[in-house]
Amino acid sequence: MSDFSIIIPCFNAEATIVDTLASISAQTHLNWEVICVDDGSTDATAMLITTAGQQDPRIRLVRNPGKGTSDARNAGVRDHANGRLIVFCDAADMWLPNKLAELSKCFADQSVDGCFGQAGFFQDSPVDATIFSTVIAEDMTVEMLLSENPVCTMSNLAIRNSAFVASGGFDSRLVDNEGLEWLTRLVNGGARVIGLVSLQTWCRTNTDGLSTDLSAMQSGRDQNIHIASRFGVRVALAAHAVHHR
C-alpha cells in the first residue's frame, strides 16, 4: 500500500501535465502513486502520461467513466486509489519537493483528517509568483471556508482516504466551487482539517477558467451557503465582505 494516492483529473492538459508530473516525481517522500484520470482528452495528454508512466511506474493513466472534474476525482479515489492518504492535484499545478514529506509528518497525528499548506499563484513560471495564500493556525471552520477559503485550490489539500469516503465525495452536479462545497460538508461532518505554515503548492492562474465566470462563482457560493445553513451555520456580514473583496 502506498502512503499517498495522488489524484489528477486531466482534460486536454498537454501544455502543463509534464511539468505537473515532474514536480511530483521530484518529491523527497518516495512512497506514492499517481492516478491520472483522463476525462476524454483529444490532445496528447494521454500519450504524455503514458510516457511518464513508462519512466516512472508509480504513474498510471485511467479513464473517467463519468464526465467532469468531480466525477474524475471521485472515480480516482473510489476505483483506483490504494493509499491511506489522498492528495489532489490539478493538471496545471505543481508542488514543492518537500510537500509529501511535510504532509506525512502532519498525518502522524491520528486526530488530523485533512491538511493543507500555503499556495503561491503564477501565470508562466513559479518564480514569477507574487500572490500567496494565508494559512490560519487554527482548525478549519465553515466560517473560514465561506469568507476567505485558506485552502484555495484542491491541489493544496490532502485527506485520509477513510475521511473522503465517509464524506460522500464531490457533488458532480456542481460546475463551480465543487471543492468548497465538499469542504463545507467535510468540516460540518466533524472532520478535523488543519493548515501548515509552509509553501507547498504552485497554482497556475488561468484567465479563461471558471474563476472568471462571476455568475457561476456566485451560484456556487449560494449553494455553499445553503449547505452551511442546513448545519445551523449563518454567514456573517464580515465573511461576505471578505469573499467579495
Image (cartoon, grey):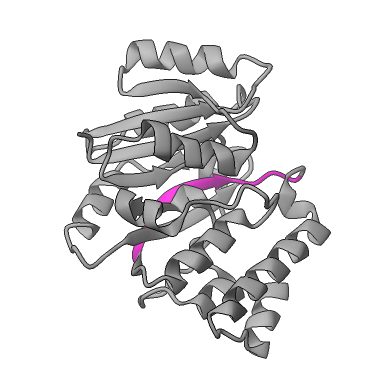
Main secondary structure type of the part rendered in magenta: strand
Quadrant into which the C terminus falls: bottom right
Q: Is residue 200 magenta?
A: yes
Residue ID at (61%, 55%):
178
Residue 196 lies left or right of residue 167; in this view the side is left
Q: Is residue 5 above or below residue 112?
A: above
Can the viewer see residue 150?
no
Q: Seen in the image, is 156 located left or right of residue 244?
A: left
Residue at position x 31%, y 23% in the image: 58
Q: Which residues are magenta?
A: 196-207
Image x and y of residue 128, in percent: 57, 46
**Residue 2 sits in which quadrant?**
top left
Residue under the image location 55 percent in, 68 percent down: 149
Q: Nearer the viewer, residue 198 or 163?
A: 163
Location of the N terminus by quadrant is top left
Hey, which quadrant is residue 181 in on the image? Answer: bottom right
Left or right relative to 139: residue 144: right
Q: Residue furthest bottom?
A: 237
On the image, the x and y values in percent for residue 206 come to 69, 44
* Residue 220, image x, y percentages: 70, 62
Which quadrant of the structure image shows residue 108? bottom left
Q: Nearer the viewer, residue 221 or 137?
A: 221
Q: Across the whole image, how many numbered discs are drawn on residues?
A: 0
Q: Is 56 located above or below residue 149 in the figure?
A: above
Residue 242: % across, % down: 65, 78
The answer to whether residue 31 is seen in the rendering is: yes
**Residue at the farthest right position:** 215
